[in-house]
Amino acid sequence: MSGKVRPQAYLDEAVSPLEITPLKIDIMRTREKDSSSLAVQGKRPIIVCETVADTETSSPTDDGERAGWGSKVQFLLSVVAYAVGLGNVWRFPYLCQKNGGGAFLIPYFVMLIIEGIPLCVLELGIGQKLRLGSIGVWNKIHPLLGGLGISCAIVALLVGWYYNVVIAWCFFYLFSSLQTRLPWADCPLIETGLSTGLHSGLSTGLSTGLSTGLSTGLDTGLSTDLPSGLSTGLSSGFVSVNVTTIVNKECAASSPTAFFWFREALDITDGIDEFGGMQWKIAGCLVFSWFLIFVCMARGIENSGWIMYFTAGFPYFVLVIFFGRAITLKGSSAGLRFLFTPQMSRLLDPIVWLDAATQIFYSLGLGFGSLIAFGSYNPRDNKFTRDAVFVSLTNAFTAIFASVLVFAILGFKATLGIESCACSQIKNVASMLHLTSAELSAVMQTPEECLEYYNLLAADPTAYELPADIFANSTCSFEKLMNEAAEGTGLAFIVFTQAIVELPWAPLWSVLFFTMLLALGMGSMFGNLAGIQTSIYDLKLFPWLKQQVLSGILCTCSCIIGLIFVTKSGMYWVGMFDSFVGTFSLMIIALLEMVGVCWVYKYSRFAADVQEMTGQTLSRYWEITLKFLAPAVILFVLISSIAMRITTGISYPAYDSQTAMMKETSYPVWAQVIAFFLIMAGILPIVAVAALRMLGIVKYEPDPSMINAGFNSSASTAMFAKVPSTADFDLLTRPTSFAIGDSLRVYCPQFDENP
C-alpha cells in the first residue's frame, strides 16, 4: 500500500484502523456541520483518510524514518550479548554451589518458564508494536504509566555508571597479563637490610656524635664531632647488617591474588568513609572503556549490530577453549561432581527459590527498557515470541555451561590445594613418626604420593602412634576448599586468577579470560545505553542533536560521574550501587509493566496485536503467566527482599588491612541516606508523573501518530490530555448516531474486550 492520500470515500468502505493518521483534523472541524446535514438526507458522513507505508509506523528520527537491524541475526546477537553478561559467569555458578548443586536447576528452570520468558515476550512485543523506546511506550499505553519509562532510563543509567567500572577492572587485568609472568603469581618481597642498617647507623652516629660533642663543647661537637659520628655510625650500621628480603606481611596473611586485587588494583581503604584519593591506573582504564563505548554507540543501530558479532560470539569461543582445557585438568571431575550432586532437601528452603527468581530476573536484563528498545527496531512482522524463547534458553544454557567450566577449574585448584596441605601436614608430624630424611623424601616424592600417605594417616592416626585428633583442625578437605568459592569480583579477580596461575602458559589463558569478560560486559553496556539513547530520541527533547553528539555527551558525563568508583574507596561505592539501584525499583517496574499491559491495556488486545503483527495466536500459557503467575512471583521476590533487608540490616563488607580479611561493617548515616535515594530514584518518577497528571498540573499531549500504532485517546486518557488535543481526538472517535465509532475503532485502554 502506498503512502499517497486516499480519495474521499463514504464510510461504507472498509477502513483499517491502521490506515488512519492525523485525519486532517482541521478539515473535520469544518465538516462537522455537514455531517448533521447528511444525516437529515440519510447519508453517512465523509472523512478524509491518509494511508501509511506498510513498513513504517514509527516515530521519526533525523532521517524521517526509524532505523532498523541490518538482519535478524544482528538483532538476535545484540539481544544475546545484552542478556548474557558477567552474572552468567560469576554469579550463577556460586548460586549452584550455595543452593544444592544440581538441585538448584529445578527452581531455576521453573522461574525461567513462569517469569523470565513471559516478561521477555512482553517487552519485545510492546517495543515492536509501538516502535518506540521505553518512555514513549508507557506514555501511549496510559498517561498515568508515563513515569515507568523515565524510571527505566534512570535505573539503566545508574547501573551503567558502576557497571562500566567492572569493565575498567577487566581492562587493568588484561593489560597486566601482557608479561611473561603474571604479577599476581607471587607475593612482593620487601628489602629489610637497608632500613635496618640505616636505623642502626643513625642510632650509633647520633649517640657517638652527641656524647663526644657534649664533652668537647657544643660548638665543636655540632660542627665536627656530630658529622664524624654519624658517618662512622652509618658505615658500621651498613657493615654490620646484611640486606635481606621478606614477604609482604599483608600478602602473606591472604594470598598473592587477593593482595594484587585489593592493594595493587584497588589500593582499597578500610571503609567507605575513607576517600583515599584517586586510583589513577583504574581511572585511565575507565576513560578508555567509555571511549570505546562511545565509538561503538556513535555508529548507530544500523551498524552497532555488527559489533555484536564479536561481543556475542567471542565469549562462546573462549568458553569452548577453556572447557577443552578445563576437563583435562587434574581434579576437574571432582569439581563437576561437587557442582551437580543434587541436595534435594535444599528445595524446601524458600531462599533457594528466591535466589532462582532473582537470578532469572537480572540475568535477562528485564525492566531496564533495553529489550523494548531492541524490539522497536524490528520489522512489524517479526515473530518475536520465538526470539524471546531463544534468547532465554541461550542465557540459561550459557549459565550452565559457564558453571561447568568454572567448577572444573575450581576442582583443579582445590586438588592442588589439598595436595599442598597434605605435604605440609606430613612435614609437621614427621618427627612424631620418626621418619628419616630419606623416608620423608620418599613419601613426598610427588604430590599424589604425599596425598595418598596423608589419607592413610588421617584415616586412623592412632595406628601410627599419633593422637586421634591431630588432624581435627586440618584444612585438607576438598569440600572445605570448594566451599571457599566466591561470587562476583571475588570469583573473577581472586579465585579464578589463582587457578589461572597454575596453568601452563598462564598469561595466554589470562588474556583470553579477561577478554571474554570484556566482551560480556561491553555487550551488556551497549544494550543498556541503547535503551537510554532510544528513549531520549523518542522524547524529542533535543531534535536538533545528532546521534554522535548525544552519544558523546552521554558517555562523557557518565565517565566524569563514574570517577567516584575509581577512588580508593571505589569498590564500596560499586557495592552500594549494586545493592540498592537494581533491586526494589526494577522489580516494581516489571510488576507495573505486566499490570499496564495485561490489565490496563488488556491482555486480549495485546494478544490481538501479536496475531496482527506475526500471524501467531498466543496460547493460554502466556495469558496465565503474564496475568497471574509472573506478577505473583515478582511480588513474592519483592516482599521477601524487603523483609530480608530489614532483618539483616544495611551493612557492607569492608577490607581490614591488618588481617587482610573482609568484615561486615554498618554503613554510616550519610551512606544510608544515599542508599535510600538510590532506591527512590527508580520509584519516584512513577509516582510523581502519575500524581502530576491526576492533579492536572502536567497535561499529557497525545501524539496524533499514535493512531498509526493502533492507539487512540479515550475517556480514560482524555482527562489527562491538553484541552485542544482532547477536543480534536474526541471529534474523531466519539460515537454518533451514524456509528462513526464502529468504523474508527482502534485499540485503546478503555475500549471493549473484543475489538
Image: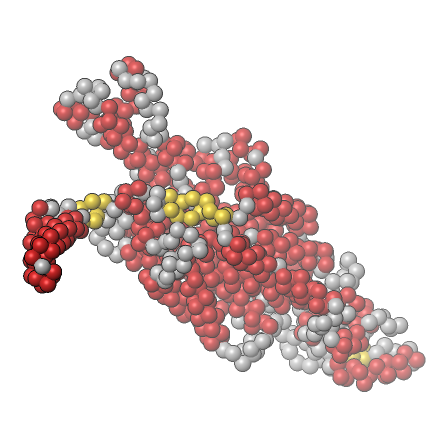
In which quadrant of the rendered view does residue 299 lie? bottom left
Whether residue 667 sits left or right of residue 437 in the image: it is: right
Q: Nearer the viewer, residue 563 or 489?
A: 563
Q: Nearer the viewer, residue 546 or 554?
A: 554
In which quadrant of the rendered view does residue 647 lie? top right
Res. 500 visible in picture = no
Q: Give percent across and percent down for residue 178.
A: 26, 56
Q: Give percent across and percent down for residue 505.
A: 24, 48
Q: Give percent across and percent down for residue 245.
A: 17, 46
Whether residue 192 sits left or right of residue 644 in the image: it is: left
Could you tell me which quadrant the C terminus lies in? bottom right
Position of residue 53 relative to residue 161, above or below, is below
Please report the residue visible at 25 percent of the width from the left and 30 percent of the height from the top: 424
Position of residue 18 relative to residue 524, above or below, is below
Position of residue 153 relative to residue 441, above or below, is below
Could you tell me which quadrant the N terminus lies in? bottom right
What number of labels is visible? 0
Q: Give percent across and percent down for residue 578.
A: 49, 54
In which quadrant of the rendered view does residue 298 lie? bottom left
Q: Nearer the viewer, residue 236 or 321?
A: 236
Q: Nearer the viewer, residue 482 or 204?
A: 204
Res. 352 visible in picture = yes
Please report the residue visible at 70 percent of the width from the left and 74 percent of the height from the top: 701
Position of residue 170 relative to residue 59, above or below, is above
Please report the residue visible at 29 percent of the width from the left and 36 percent of the height from the top: 416
Please report the residue visible at 30 percent of the width from the left and 46 percent of the height from the top: 250
Whether residue 144 sits left or right of residue 11 in the image: it is: left
